[in-house]
Image: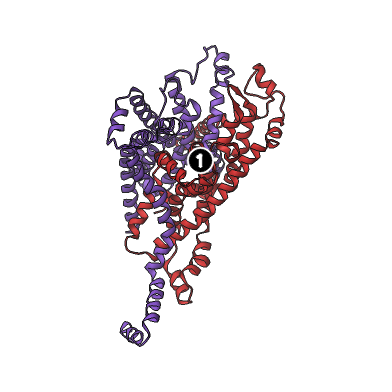
């Protein structure tokens, strides 16, 4: 695609650019300008969060000067937060819940996808559609009956209730991604493995998982994103500081009555948003493959 | 033949060993293995999705102290309440306008991205996806601070340009528009990514053939692009309608339903009634009001998805 573009571009300069080419060049520059405008608008809030996180409390309280820029940058907010045991606790809770959620969801969904696509049983096609249907059930539909369920399990205000609940949000879509990837692996591979005497689990482990590794990464990123960013469940089921996770802890702990410690809140947001952004920066292509999996994979 | 000899062999064994063997054979059967592999998922979804869904139906028909059965009483009570009528209005307004705007901007963005050379797309795509990558609850905190009345960054700009400051979240209509704006900011990139993937799947030859026949840009759009990506457009819009309709984070953080309950959506109102005020049955009925709408959307998503699956299989 780009090679063809370069080739046509090389052929042109000898002649005077035709009307069509001029038109195309204008369209190209127009596209860049419009994209730049969108990027500018999209990045305003993150920029402002970052600026505020670098301001001292005095600078914010003084309400003088242009709020869009930081006049006396300081890392005090970050240092204060990191030395706060509560904040460290939220971070640790978030990390632990995310790790458990990712591990549990991936085991469950890889097994299920393999069973549905490659082995199959009576009604497995219906079950696959049913799995996709549960992906469409939002968290805010079931959080009240789940409150009762969690309460009867004695897990209210226990951070581990999240490790039980998050897989319900992650598993359906992860399974769906894996169904798509497993389905695209040629059937001949199974036969070779079976002839070599491999059992089903061995076949899954040494053939399907390595071949579908991009899918595994995409699904892992999805499960992590879901569990890191979820807000409703922790807000509804956790109330004491030692059990909270980042998304609910930041606002809850730093707002006392009417006093907003905006600098610290924003610094907390920066630190809490960092892990997903770092993952995204390194694994953007897998991330996008996961996003579009519902659309481009059968 | 093979089965016959096996059965003969088994008949000679003591019954216990035969049963054992039958078990083992069942365990080694393909479909049994498949079912066992799906079992954790079935248990998870059955226990924490299906069961709560049915339980919600039961809960919604109880009275506040969960001692008596009131039938559809909770639903009727809600429908007669002015606050709840506002909730229905606000949820629909929020979801429909936000999704239309997201679809519109996402469509434009996808085309802009499609216009520029492939090798430049990576960096632009990376920048444009940032709103989608930051967890919504955190970025909404940032928006909240942008809208802050006393030291608001937006009002500073407005004052600088000579306009009067706006109490962004303090008055019903500006607050409603702010929420829609935040949701559009968050979700447009998702639409862009989906549409871009769709646009790339349209064969280039179709456009070339159309150009030879003298088709203009608008004709290409109407007769090639739109029909080819119609399926993904509808799946994305329907999916986004579900998610936006059920949104909780934005409203909860920005206004928590205020001023005067004018900005509550189903999710935040259910939270206030069911968790904060402790009326679990009424809260369950509030969120169940979402169900029929979501079911209709989900039905169409599923139909589109399975239809595409069949097309791919053929």
Q: Which residue is mark 1?
A: A230
Judge whether A113 appears above or below B100 on screen.
Answer: below
Among the chains, which one is purple?
A: B
Q: Is residue A137 above or below residue A30?
A: below
- Residue A277: image x %, image y %? 59, 41
Q: Is residue A260 left or right of residue A80?
A: left
Residue B74 position, x and y percent, is 31, 32
Q: Is residue A281 visible?
A: no
**Is the residue A71 above or below the residue A223 in the image?**
above
Of A4 and B80, the residue lying toward us: B80
Quarter of the image for residue B65 reads top left
For disc 1, the chain is: A
- Please identify the quarter of the rendering in which residue A261 is found: top right
Q: Element type at marker 1? A: loop
Which is more toward the observer, A184 or A136?
Answer: A136
| Picture coordinates of residue B94, whole percent (x, y) | 39, 29
Q: Is residue B29 visible?
A: yes
**Residue B173 or B161: which is nearer the viewer?**
B173
Task: Identify which residue is drawn at 58% across, 14% down.
Answer: B160
Chain with colour red in the figure: A
The quarter of the image holding the C terminus of chain A is: bottom left
Q: Residues within 10 Å of mark 1 (few under 14, many from 20)?
A: many
């Amino acid at each position: 695609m780009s090679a063809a573009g370069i080739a046509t571009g090389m052929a042109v300069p000898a002649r005077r650019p035709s009307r069509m080419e001029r038109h195309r060049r204008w369209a190209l520059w127009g596209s860049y300008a419009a994209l730049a405008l969108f990027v500018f608008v999209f990045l305003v809030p993150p920029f402002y969060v970052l600026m505020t996180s670098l301001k001292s409390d005095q600078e914010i309280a003084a309400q003088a000067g242009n709020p869009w820029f930081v006049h006396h940058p300081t890392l005090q907010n970050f240092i204060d937060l990191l030395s706060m045991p509560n904040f460290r606790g939220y971070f640790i809770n978030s990390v632990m819940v995310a790790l458990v959620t990712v591990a549990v969801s991936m085991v469950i969904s890889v097994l299920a996808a393999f069973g549905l696509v490659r082995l199959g049983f009576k009604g497995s096609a219906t079950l696959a559609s049913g799995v996709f249907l549960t992906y469409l059930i939002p968290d805010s539909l079931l959080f009240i009956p789940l409150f009762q369920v969690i309460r009867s399990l004695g897990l209210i205000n226990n951070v581990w209730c999240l490790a039980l609940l998050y897989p319900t949000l992650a598993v359906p879509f992860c399974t769906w991604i894996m169904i798509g990837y497993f389905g695209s692996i040629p059937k001949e591979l199974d036969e070779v493995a079976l002839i070599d005497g491999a059992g089903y689990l061995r076949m899954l482990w040494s053939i399907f998982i390595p071949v579908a590794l991009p899918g595994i990464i995409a699904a892992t990123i999805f499960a992590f994103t879901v569990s890191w960013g979820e807000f409703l469940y922790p807000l509804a089921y956790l109330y004491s500081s030692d059990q909270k996770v980042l998304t609910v802890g930041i606002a809850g702990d730093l707002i006392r009555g009417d006093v907003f410690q905006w600098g610290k809140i924003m610094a907390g947001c920066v630190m809490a948003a960092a892990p997903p952004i770092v993952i995204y920066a390194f694994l953007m292509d897998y991330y996008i493959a996961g996003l579009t999996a519902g659309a481009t994979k059968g | 033949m093979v089965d016959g000899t096996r059965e003969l062999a088994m008949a000679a064994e003591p019954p216990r060993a035969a049963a054992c063997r039958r078990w083992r054979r069942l365990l080694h059967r393909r479909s049994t293995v498949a079912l066992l592999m799906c079992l954790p998922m079935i248990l998870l979804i059955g226990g924490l999705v299906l069961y709560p869904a049915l339980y919600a139906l039961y809960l919604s028909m109880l009275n506040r102290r969960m001692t008596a059965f009131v039938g559809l009483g909770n639903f009727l009570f809600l429908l007669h309440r002015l606050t709840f009528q506002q909730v229905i209005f606000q949820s629909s307004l929020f979801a429909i306008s936000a999704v239309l705007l997201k679809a519109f901007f996402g469509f434009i963005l996808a085309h802009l991205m499609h216009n520029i050379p492939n090798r430049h797309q990576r960096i632009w795509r990376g920048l444009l996806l940032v709103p989608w990558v930051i967890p919504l609850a955190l970025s909404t905190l940032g928006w909240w601070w942008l809208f802050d009345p006393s030291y608001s960054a937006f009002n500073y700009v407005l004052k600088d340009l000579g306009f009067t400051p706006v109490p962004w979240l303090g008055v019903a209509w500006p607050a409603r528009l702010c929420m829609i704006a935040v949701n559009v900011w968050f979700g447009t990139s998702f639409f862009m990514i989906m549409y871009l993937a769709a646009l790339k799947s349209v064969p280039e030859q179709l456009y070339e053939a159309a150009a030879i026949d003298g088709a203009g840009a608008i004709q290409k759009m109407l007769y090639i692009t739109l029909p080819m990506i119609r399926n993904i457009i509808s799946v994305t819009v329907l999916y986004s309608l579900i998610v936006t309709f059920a949104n909780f984070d934005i409203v909860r953080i920005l206004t928590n339903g205020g001023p005067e309950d004018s900005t509550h959506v189903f999710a935040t109102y259910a939270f206030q009634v069911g968790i904060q005020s402790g009326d679990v049955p009424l809260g369950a009925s509030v969120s169940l009001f979402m169900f029929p709408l979501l079911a209709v959307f989900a039905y169409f998503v599923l139909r589109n998805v399975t239809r595409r699956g069949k097309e791919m299989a053929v």
